[in-house]
Amino acid sequence: MAHTPTAVAEELTPEQRQSVLRTLKSPRLLKTEILAGLVVALALIPEAIAFSIIAGVDPRYGLFASFTMAVSIAFLGGRPAMISAATAATALVIAPLVASHGIEYLIATVILAGVFQVLLAVLGVAKLMRFIPRSVMVGFVNALAILIFTSQFPDLIGVPWLVYPMVAVGLVIIYLLPRITAVVPAPLIAIALLTVLAVVFALNVPTVGDKGELPESIPELFIPDVPFTMETLQIIAPYALGMAAVGLLESLMTAKLVDDVTDTRSDKVRESWGQGAANIITGFFGGMGGCAMVGQTMINVKASGARTRVSTFMAGIFILILAVSLGDIVALMPMAALVAVMIFVSVATFDWHSIKPSTLKMMPKSETSVMLVTVIATVWTHNLAIGVGLGVLTAMVLFARRVAHLATVERRIEQHFGEEMVKYEVSGELFFASSNDLYTQFNYAEDPDHVVIDMHNSHVWDASTVASLDAITEKYSKYGKRVEISGLNTASAALHERMAGNLGAGH
């Protein structure tokens, strides 16, 4: 019995849905990927223009960056269906440099940032993702959803009243159309219908053309005209490093988010150096650089159902075609249509389960605190890197405080060959947080002359613990008492033997 394309698509595993070859052989899957790329491109153009304005450059630098980043990462990236383009995060980093030194230094910075990203990938920066707790990830997602929503305010405040019913109509189409048919992505239908309404009835509403002029030519090879000196490197290196770090963090966090949404795995190392290579290519074609875009990626993956590199590639191609060849038509699109799409994306992105009363009641307070810190810091600073960094730092501090109380000391007086002795049994993981107060848990003056510290239920992790044991031994010696440390496991004994007595005075 022959399978229909729909049936075949339903039988595919998440990993098979990522196959470019399968997609090219299936008209239904290919149509989904191409239309998803079109929806992303339509939503990206006004954002790329807006990010160019933030960076202080002409709109074409943002649009060219979006084209070259998307096309490059479609081949080089490690996460299929993820969208990379010009972003607000990188625009904010480079804006001061543009203001002080101009576009030539900007392009040099983009290229150097790409080089830094490749080097960071080689050094294994992607492996650091394992140290980002789930609560930080949830906070990142929720903060991102809030930022996507609030970023629509400029297009909703102080605008003609017709904007509001148009946004409402767009949302109704996006939410209800999938219940009737999924042949064409609902966001694309909403954009097309609202554009036709605005043109036919000559509605006086803000359009994409109001954001800035679109380019009239394709990008060309661009070699930055800057002196190749140490002085130039000193100027651009701090900005390049900041751009590289922010770009990699946002890209890897987005990749992890898409992994969860699609129930598949991605190659984070490949994604890291792929982002670097894409920025290098973007710089040499006169783009302002960028990284993965969470909002556009969610449009691609959640709203449009894309799963392969085809959608990413087509998004880049459509950006170029729409911006250069069909710029006059694209300029007519009402911003209300794109606002409706982005509001849908923000609602779909937010993890509503994380704020349900039942979830909050069940979740440890430390986990909820970490999530809130991540959300508040990200929304307050409008910087995902700062929010995630503070979230991870908060998680580390709370974890250290929690485990600091896991180390226990029990005291027993025993008789050993007729001699009275005291045995202290130390249990738990001993490191800087848990061993700092170890020194205070011994009765130095009252204890008998023979003191045994039994460590068989503990593990020594760092120099702080060795220093604490040294301080305890030295304190007892001042009272003329002998200390015996026993029960150390192999690793702890090796560390103690190597460092004991060599850490200086004090405790």
Image: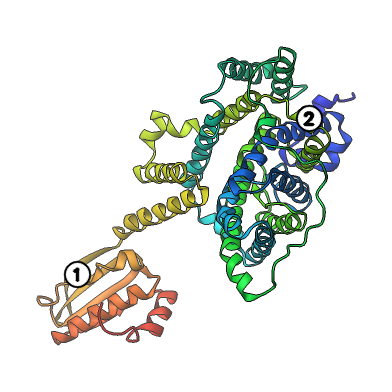
Q: Is residue 232 left or right of residue 287?
A: left
Cα distance in 3D space between marks 2 and 1: 76 Å
The quadrant of the picture occupied by the N terminus is top right
Question: Hey, which quadrant is residue 471 in on the image?
Answer: bottom left
Element at label 2: helix
Disc 2 target residue: 328
Any part of residue 190 in sight = yes
Amino acid type of disc 1?
Answer: Thr
- Asked if residue 276 is positioned above or below residue 210 in the image, the reply reads below
Q: Quadrant of residue 409?
A: bottom left
Query: SS class of the residue under badge 1?
Result: helix
Image point (40%, 75%), residue name: 492
Please tell me which residue lies in front, 97 or 238.
97
Q: Residue at x 72, y 41 (%)?
A: 81
> Vertically, is 472 above or below 293?
below
Checking the image for residue 60, the label placed there is none
**Please, is residue 186 above or below residue 501 in the view?**
above
